[in-house]
Image: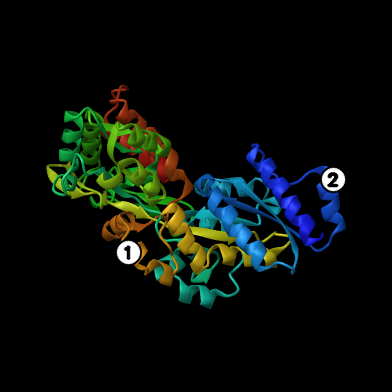
Amino acid sequence: MKRKNFIWFLVLLLTVLLSGCQKHSSDSLEKEQTADSDTVNLTVWGAEEDEALLYQIIDGFISQYSGQADFVITYAAQSESNCTDALMEDLENGADVFAFADDQLNTLVAAGALEPVENAEAVRESNLPESVLAASVNDTLYALPLTADNGYFLYYNKQYFSEEDIASLDRMLDIAAEHDKKISMEWSSGWYVYSLFGNTGLTVGLSDDGITNYCTWNSTEGNIKGRDVALAMMDIAGHSGFVSTDDSGFLEGVRNGTIIAGVNGVWNAVAVEEAWGRNFGAAKLPCYTCAGKQVQMASFSGYKLIGVNAYSKHREWATKLAEWITNEENQELRFQLRGQGPSNIHAAASKEVQDSPAISALLEQSEFSCLQRIGGNFWEPVATFTSNILAGNPSGVSLQQQLDTMVEDIIAP
């Protein structure tokens, strides 16, 4: 396919995309591609919010390798949080290159979806050690680090809170209630709920078998017991200044003024700053009251990675594209356009990144965070438990019994 014709073809494909279709092909085009052995067809999965960014990066890749092949590169929106589930539906025909959260790495490797990275030493040298660890299984690198910011912290509107106020969740909830506003946090996700258990001496994590979990969230021993956390959650849930909502609900509340602080991540930093302007603030998570003590809220830390499908029909080019997406320049571009923290050592050390309030808050929170390594049975039991807490425990079942049931389901084989 001639370069001129390919440019026309790409414009046509982008037009189709903007009309709501994420496919870059038709029957006639497929016949043309089949006839041309030089055509490299690649599918890229990335977050919906990254669409404009990825198109810019893909355009740069096509320009960089112009003349070496004719590229037909398809972008499709796919949540990084459930990328593995989508890929496992048809692995051999799945995306060639895909973004995913690091907690899915073990599953992808076990399924044979990823092969060891060939230039592993170069990747190790150019990325933060923690991000390399997150992309490795048993010291073998299987994916390319993309970001070092997949954690959460506190966003707050400086119009309502002082630096002293944001140290205490209790104080923040009272201030929000006084102004008929809300502090938000997503309790339907165990990822965020961990923050209330994580610094109490109660534990959860992946067992040595790499599949099942261990969990002591229902413990009746120690300075803070499982029931103490559940009671604290009941108090928070019942406060008029609190709301549990997901990402879209958080942003909607920030924009319409009903939410004046919330627990969220850097992926929404640009949108929150646009809404709050000079009142935009970010900090580590506050302390909350549990068993009569002030407990610093914990967090899961995480990394976004780029994987290359082991079954890709153009694996060499897919690898080049993955390397292009994760290189220093494009990680810098990702920070500029999306506010996401680079894993690349040089990009992360830039003054622009270091001066970012959101990145600074994430670094401050990192002292109280740990790498997420959780088996699949964790999520649904936690969501079931928290939904009853949020509803005010209408069932009347004792909190200890609910904790026991949740833990039993979390550690189930």
Q: Between marks 1 and 2, how big is the CA–CA gap?
A: 50 Å
| Residue named by callout 2 | 28
Q: Which mark is residue 354?
A: 1
Q: Secondary structure at mark 1?
A: helix
Up-down: is 278 above or below 242? below
Q: Which mark is residue 130?
A: none
Q: Is residue 47 left or right of residue 390?
A: right
Q: Is residue 9 left or right of residue 146?
A: right
Query: What amino acid is found at the position of numbered circle 1 in the picture?
Result: Gln
> At 43% from the left edge and 58% from the top edge, which residue is drawn?
335
Residue 24, percent from left and from top:
72, 47
Residue 44, percent from left and from top:
63, 53
Residue 191, percent from left and from top:
38, 46
Up-down: is 33 above or below 192? below
175 vs 392, nearest the viewer: 175
> At 47% from the left edge and 77% from the top edge, which residue is drawn?
125
46 vs 16, nearest the viewer: 16
> At 50% from the left edge and 67% from the top edge, which residue is drawn?
329
> At 84% from the left edge and 55% from the top edge, which residue is drawn?
34
Up-down: is 134 above or below 33? below
Q: Is residue 175 left or right of residue 63?
A: left
Q: Residues within 10 Å of mark 2 (few under 14, many from 20)?
A: few
Q: Earlier in the sequence, mark 1 or mark 2?
A: 2
| Count of numbered labels shown in the rendering | 2
Query: What amino acid is found at the position of numbered circle 2 in the picture?
Result: Ser
Q: Is residue 3 left or right of residue 102?
A: right
Q: Secondary structure at mark 2?
A: helix
